[in-house]
Image (tube, coloured by chain):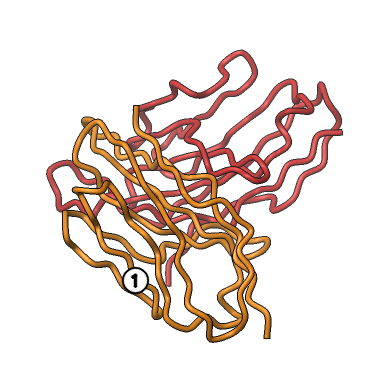
Chain colours: A red, B orange
Amino acid sequence: EAEVAQSPRYKITEKSQAVAFWCDPISGHATLYWYRQILGQGPELLVQFQDESVVDDSQLPKDRFSAERLKGVDSTLKIQPAELGDSAMYLCASSLGLAGALRQSYEQYFGPGTRLTVT
Amino acid sequence: GDSVTQMEGPVTLSEEAFLTINCTYTATGYPSLFWYVQYPGEGLQLLLKATKADDKGSNKGFEATYRKETTSFHLEKGSVQVSDSAVYFCALSVRGGSNYKLTFGKGTLLTVNP
């Protein structure tokens, strides 16, 4: 069964350092999401891509976070500089996301996540 | 805006007990409703879903019915197992253009003891 891949699974970094996370969605999925999950909370959307274009980045702290999906396939989320409050699980999800298709095409499949600890 | 409120945990049950986790929502449009499960150290897995009023989603013995009149989507299971121990998230999705983002509740930790 196809899965969403993420790496690394765990990352420890010092504050003020740069950190990057990678996501490879299920093959053929046009829509890719990055969520942040703080311990004890539900995931919150950071950014959504449709192919290589950003659809929604309204909750992305753009002064320190950036995301790209240059060829419309895999994606990278970067934090620079990292702050203590960025410690969280970063989840990637993908969906078929075909315009005009059935609602089932928007079902999201999640990767295992990257757990970030900022010290 | 859209929001999901679910019963706070933790919930601790004995094996074979009946489970209910309450979930209510507010939405600007007509939402699809979901329950996700997260096992320790893992990402989220879709447990079940319902896309319109009175639909019942079911999977692995879990059920939830989309109640538009009470804006609820409560999760139930008749007999829980130790392997059901996990965090359960209620979520909704309302389409805005090509944006189908999920809005999650805070999660409910379930522990099932043998």
Question: A73 above or below A3?
Answer: above
Describe residue A61's horizontal placement relative to residue B67 as left or right.
Answer: right
Describe residue B67's horizontal placement relative to residue A118 as left or right.
Answer: left
* Residue type, label 1: Glu
Task: Please name whichever residue, B50 or A45, is drawn nearer the observer in this view of the structure.
Answer: B50
Query: Which of the 4 image quadrants contains residue B63?
Result: bottom left
Residue displayed at 41% across by 62% down: B46
Placement of the N terminus of chain A among the 4 image quadrants: bottom left
Task: Please name whichever residue, A88 or B17, is drawn nearer the observer in this view of the structure.
Answer: B17
Q: How crowded is the residue under tag 1: few (<14 C-alpha within 10 Å), some, or many (20+)?
A: many
Question: B35 above or below A12?
Answer: below
Residue B33 screen position, x and y as percent: 30, 52
Describe residue A58's horizontal placement relative to residue B69 as left or right.
Answer: right
Q: Tell me the element at label 1.
A: strand
Q: Can you identify the residue that label 1 sits on?
A: B63
Residue A85 screen position, x and y as percent: 73, 28
Residue B85 screen position, x and y as percent: 61, 71
Query: Which of the 4 image quadrants contains residue A79?
Result: top right
Question: A56 above or below B20?
Answer: above
Residue displayed at 23% across by 37% down: B95
- Please give the chain letter of the residue carrying mark 1: B
Task: Please name whichever residue, B35 or B15, is drawn nearer the observer in this view of the structure.
Answer: B15
Residue B89 screen position, x and y as percent: 48, 54
Describe residue A27's horizontal placement relative to residue B85 as left or right.
Answer: left
Residue displayed at 40% across by 70% down: B76
